[in-house]
Every structure is written in structure tokens, then in C-alpha cells.
Amino acid sequence: MPNARTPSRPPRPSPPDNRLVVALAYDGLCTFEFGVAVEIFGLPRPEMGDGWYRFAVCAAEPGPLRAAGGIRVLCDGGLDLLEAAGTIVIPGWRGVDAPVPEAIRDALRRAHARGARVLSLCSGVFVLAAAGLLAGRACTTHWRYARALADAHPDLVVRPDVLYVDEGCVLTAAGSAAGIDLCLHLIRRDFGAQAASSVARRLVVPPHREGGQAQFVEAPVPRAREGARLGPLLDAVRASLDRPHSIAAMARAAGMSARTFQRRFEASTGHPPGEWLVLERLARARILLETTDAALDDVAAACGFGTLATLRHHFRTRLATSPGAYRRRFRGHAPLAAS
């Protein structure tokens, strides 16, 4: 799996002292990416307690501001709101060749210098690059814009083959759906797996996809017949990770030969079947270690690794830690506590 610079040994979940998330609105606003920021950070979530994020929208320029789809946007304030933000979200940009006003660049530089985190979704990375916040850093964007980004900013390490990149205080996401993955990743980083899973359930999306997963495959949307076969199969395997799932058995369930199944599975998911299965089991193990007190042997069995030795092997290989050490870093943290 490609290394997205997402920390393999992430810090123990620790909610930021400043919970204010500010999304940047501009004329020509990308509606979907903006909606992602609102949905994840801006909705009331009483189940999360008093320590959850607060949300505001700042106008990047004098209004009225138009958004894709014929929508007009009224904001909570201007760029001065960035001075109070703990996290800033740039939900796309109006064009890869569109200049970024100096006022926006200055405001972002000041906010970042005092410690604010900045996130870009899709083409929003061009705003961060114009502000000089990505110099020498790894970053990503939609695969269609990756070449334009690299050409315009040769000092960046552009990763066109990943969903998102976490550089600590600067985070970038690829296409629109990858923005959801990055925002859930940040929730997981701030509040832990339980909080991220709760928000993901509301969104009806997977609670965790590694940033290093490929964002683009040659056949991103399988033909209808193949989708009808593979979709239910993936759901069934995820629901029974504790059971053995050989490639031959999965191919039979999908109604394909083993060779055809492996080729079409990788084209549809970005991973060979065996690799995908290990990643799904590892993700389940991480959630169990973070949210339960189950014995390590039981965690290994519940995830389909069979033995504790196998569980330890995959944790060391992929996360550079052990299951016990991972649990000590995450278990016991009260992810929804107010500061």
C-alpha cells in the first residue's frame, strides 16, 4: 500500500484546545465539498457532549457569494474569523488556474503561524499551495488536477495515488468522497474510533479508510453485472471477518473464475483480494482494541487472524507497533469528554 505520510504510529487521540472549525466560502463555491465540511463539523451532535467542534463559515471576499447549483451563500463573517479558528477547511477552489487573492493567502498564513490546522478538500489544495503552506510537504488532490498542481508548484511532493495525506497541521484530500475520509480521519485523530464510527454511521459510510488507499483505478465503476456480484460479496465478507475467506471461495460466490475474480476485484477496490481482506481485518482489530476490553486472543479470532501471533505480525508489519501497545495508546481515552 502506498505510504501517504499518514502516521503509522498516530498520537493518542487528543481533542484540540480550540474546537472552532471555520470553512472558507468563496464565489464559485464547490457545493459538495462545502457540504462535507458542514455535515461533519457543522451539525449539532448532542450525543458527543459539550466538547464537540464548533462551526462557522467565513466569506473569502465581499458577497453575495454564489455556489455551484445556483445557491447563494450568506456567511457568519469575513476573513477575520480565521483569526479565531483552530481548524480551517478549504472546500475546493473555483479553478486550478484561478488566482488566490492575497487577502486569503495572508489570512491563512497568519492562522497557520499561530497554530491553526488547515485542511483542503479536492482542488482546495491550490489555495494552500498559493499561500505557501505546502512547500516541501507531501500532499494530494483529485487525480485530474495532480499534474497541474505539480507543474504549478514544483516544490511540493504531490501524491496522486492516495486518498488523503496527513502532515500533522496541514492535511489534504483527493476527490470529493476522499474529503469525507479525511474529515473522519481527523475526528478519529481528535476523539478516537468510537466518535468517528458514530459520525460515519450517520453518514452511512465506512468509518475508516487508510489514506494510502488508491484514489483512482482504471475501472472505478464496475459494469452493472460485476457490481451486482462484488457489492454483496464485500458486504458479506465484512460481516463475517471471523470466518475463513479463500480467493477460490470468494470467486465462486461472485460467479467468476479465480483469475477473472482477482483481476476485477483489484480493478474495483484498488487492492488484490488477499490484501483487501488483511486491511479489513486490521481495521476491525483496531476498532476492537480501541473500544473494548476483549482479550487479545479474542480480538485475533473475531477479526479472522486466527492466532495472536498472526495479529501481532500484521500490527508490527503495517503499524510498527504491537496490539497491546496500540491499545494502551488508545484505550481508556474518553473520546467525547469536554475540555
Image: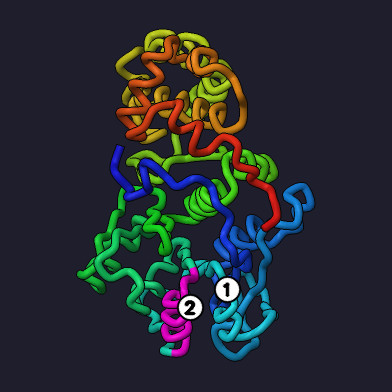
Disc 1 crowd rating (10 Å Cα; few below 14, some 14-19, many 20+) is many
Q: Amino acid at mark 1?
A: Ala
Image quadrant holding the N terminus, namely top left
> Against 60, is 279 above or below?
above
The mark found on residue 111 in the picture is 2
> Against 253, is 143 above or below?
below
> Against 293, is 301 above or below?
above
Query: Which residue: 33% across, 48% down?
Result: 4
> Against 293, is 21 above or below?
below
Label 1, secondary structure: give it. Answer: loop
Q: Amino acid at mark 2?
A: Ala
x and y percent of residue 24 in the render?
56, 75
Viewer-proximal residue, 138 or 286? 286
Secondary structure that dominates the magenta span = helix
x and y percent of residue 205 in the render?
60, 41
Label 2, secondary structure: give it. Answer: helix
Answer with left or right where residue 262 lies relative to residue 285: left
Answer with left or right where residue 125 lies relative to residue 72: left
Image quadrant holding the C terminus, namely bottom right
Q: How far is disc 1 from disc 2 in space, using C-alphas?
A: 8 Å
Query: Which residue: 58% across, 71% down?
Result: 23
Q: Kindly check if marks 1 and 2 are in contact, taking CB atoms under 8 A apart as contact.
A: yes
Q: Which residue is mark 1?
A: 85
Query: Which residue: 21% across, 70% down?
Result: 155
- Name the N-terminal-most of marks 1 and 2: 1
Disc 2 crowd rating (10 Å Cα; few below 14, some 14-19, many 20+) is many
Magenta residue check for 311: no
Q: Which residues make up the magenta segment?
A: 103-116
Viewer-proximal residue, 303 or 18? 18
Answer with left or right where residue 53 lies relative to residue 185: right
